[in-house]
């Protein structure tokens, strides 16, 4: 069993490894994961009022490959502490409650104490429960959130099939439609500084296929 040494800051916990366990590291990384457009399919609405309706967030379809990838990281990489960091409408009576219930359904491996729901429009870095360091990563589909995560924190853009049309993000990026294990391996490689990932957009594949026909 992996044990943690006492009396260390949350982002600098040392792992006491069983003999022969070679993959782990003494550094604890944190991975903060967005929900809308990242774990869950972005659902376009015609009016702002629809976002306030009961059941809107609870009934969002998951990006199953991304959800399963995050689950795999939680289960197999204790050196990476996974957190949810998803903005909500501050005046909505349902948003935070329904997002937590959605996680109970699809990602119960992430406990309530690791779920944070800052108000929409706020810098997510200010809600990371402690200072953001170079060991803290944000997986998000929105470039603005990733940019604000710095200067020390680093971002990974989730390409979800409808975003990244301007190409303004020049950091690591991962496609949502890869196999869960592939997504998980890429995220782990980035977070633990073993490699960079620059996936192309899913839209580009579709356009290339159309031209080939």
Image (spheres, rainbow, N blue to C red):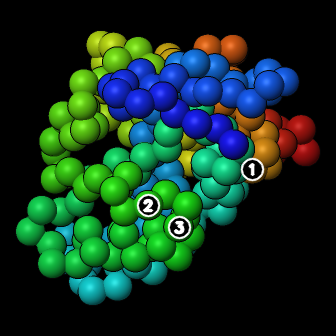
Label 1 neighbour load within 10 Å: few <14, some 14-19, many 20+: some
Residue in the image at 46% along x and 68% along y: 103
Residue under label 3: 108
Label 2, secondary structure: give it.
loop
Residue under label 2: 111
- Quarter of the image for the C terminus: give it: top right
Which label sits in the foreground, 3 or 1?
3
> Relative to 84, is 181 on the left or the right?
right
Which label sits in the foreground, 2 or 1?
2
Q: Is residue 171 visible?
A: yes
Label 1, secondary structure: give it.
helix
Q: Earlier in the sequence, mark 3 or mark 1?
A: 3
Spot the residue most to the right: 213
Image location of residue 211, percent across then percent down? 82, 38
Residue in the image at 26% along x and 68% along y: 96
Image location of residue 141, percent across then percent down? 45, 42
The alpha-carbon separation of the residues under discs 2 and 1 comes to: 21 Å
- Name the one closer to the observer, 41 or 25: 25
Q: Quadrant of residue 97?
A: bottom left
Q: Earlier in the sequence, mark 2 or mark 1?
A: 2
Label 3, secondary structure: give it.
loop
Picture layout, residue 208 above or below residue 102:
above
- Name the one closer to the observer, 52 or 184: 184
Residue in the image at 30% along x and 13% along y: 151
Residue 180: numbered disc: 1
Picture layout, residue 183 above or below residue 50:
above
- Name the one closer to the observer, 85 or 4: 4
């Amino acid at each position: 069993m992996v044990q943690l040494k006492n009396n260390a800051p949350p982002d600098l916990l040392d792992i006491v490894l069983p003999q022969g366990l070679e993959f782990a590291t003494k550094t604890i990384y944190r991975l903060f994961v967005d929900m809308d457009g990242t774990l869950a399919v972005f659902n376009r609405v015609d009016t702002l009022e629809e976002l306030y309706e009961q059941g809107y967030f609870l009934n969002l379809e998951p990006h199953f490959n991304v959800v399963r990838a995050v689950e795999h990281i939680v289960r197999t990489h204790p050196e990476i502490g996974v957190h949810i960091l998803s903005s909500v409408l501050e005046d909505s009576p349902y948003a935070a409650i329904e997002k937590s219930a959605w996680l109970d359904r699809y990602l119960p491996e992430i406990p309530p104490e690791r779920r944070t729901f800052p108000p929409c429009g706020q810098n997510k870095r200010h809600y990371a429960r402690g200072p953001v360091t170079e060991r803290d990563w944000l997986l998000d589909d929105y470039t603005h959130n990733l940019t604000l995560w710095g200067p020390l924190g680093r971002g990974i853009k989730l390409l979800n099939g409808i975003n990244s049309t301007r190409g303004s993000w020049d950091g690591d990026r991962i496609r949502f439609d890869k196999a869960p294990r592939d997504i998980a391996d890429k995220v782990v490689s980035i977070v633990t500084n073993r490699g960079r990932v620059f996936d192309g957009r899913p839209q580009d594949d579709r356009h290339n296929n159309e031209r080939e026909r």
